[in-house]
Image (cartoon, rainbow, N blue to C red):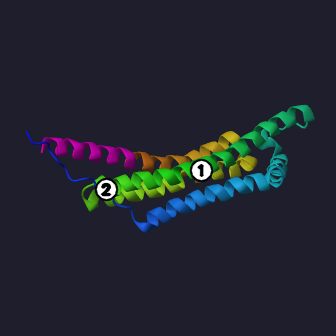
Amino acid sequence: MIPETRAPLQWRLPPVAVLLTAVVLIGCAEVGGASMVRFKVELTRWARHAMLARPATHGLVGVRDVDERVLDEALVKFDAGLRLFHLHAEGMGLVIIATTTIAATLAGSPASRRPIIVLLTVGGAGYPLGYLVWSGLIPYYGPERGKTVAEWLVWTPFGGATIVALWWLAGLVAWRMMRRERG
């Protein structure tokens, strides 16, 4: 019996704009990480000053021992948001490259390929910005309210777009593999 031979898979690159978006996102992550280190003191001073200007928002009571704990906790979350932007922007840049390459190669028709690539690119590039939004809102609205706003404005829509696109792509790839095995 002669073994079945299949043509090797020819990988296709996603559109240049997608690759550029991913590279810019990774670049922003690196600049953000470097800035976070270089301007740590200035960022902390700014956030602390903004928090002290809004004592009711942060539950400050005017007792140094109590207020310092509250401020320290909020500043830790402020710093964490900046770090999470750095990490997620790096990671999502790579995710955009990998997933859109798979979509460009394996999503059969342009009618499904284009929206999947758009959702992966926009969702992947937008999601990390939620951490910057959260950090920027902490001094003004507090950690929890800032997180809620970031969830509704950024994480849910952009993360949702990415998840929808990934499920769509996974379904198309599974369907294509089943068809290929049958025929």
**Residue 153 shows in the view:** no
Q: What residue lies at 54% left-to-right and 47% top-to-bottom? A: 155
**Residue type, label 2:** Thr
**Looking at the image, is 20 positioned above or below residue 131?**
below
User: Which disc is residue 105 wearing?
Assistant: 2
Taking the view exactly as shown, the residue that stands out farthest to the left is 1
**Residue type, label 1:** Gly
**Residue 27 shows in the view:** yes
Q: Nearer the viewer, residue 19 or 74?
A: 19
Q: What residue lies at 41% left-to-right and 51% top-to-bottom? A: 99
Taking the view exactly as shown, the residue that stands out farthest to the front is 1
Principal SS element in the magenta part?
helix
User: Which disc is residue 145 wearing?
Assistant: none
Residue under numbered circle 1: 130
Give the number of the mark in front: 1 or 2. Answer: 2
Residue 168 position in % (x across, y down): 33, 47
Q: Nearer the viewer, residue 140 or 165?
A: 165
**Would residue 75 appear left or right of 86 to someone viewing this image?**
right
Q: Is residue 105 magenta?
A: no
Which one is earlier in the sequence, the residue at label 1 or at label 2?
2
The quarter of the rendered structure image containing the C terminus is: top left
Residue 32 position in % (x across, y down): 68, 56
Q: What residue lies at 87% left-to-right and 32% top-to-bottom? A: 66
Element at label 2: helix
Crowd tier of the residue under label 2, counting other residues whose Cα lies within 10 Å: few below 14, some 14–19, many 20 or above? some
Q: Give the quarter of the image for residue 57.
A: top right
Q: What residue lies at 72% left-to-right and 46% top-to-bottom? A: 138
Residue 163 position in % (x across, y down): 42, 45
**Which stretch appears magenta?**
165-183
Q: Nearer the viewer, residue 67 or 95?
A: 95
Q: Give the quarter of the image for residue 182.
A: top left
**Would residue 171 appear left or right of 18 to someone viewing this image?**
left
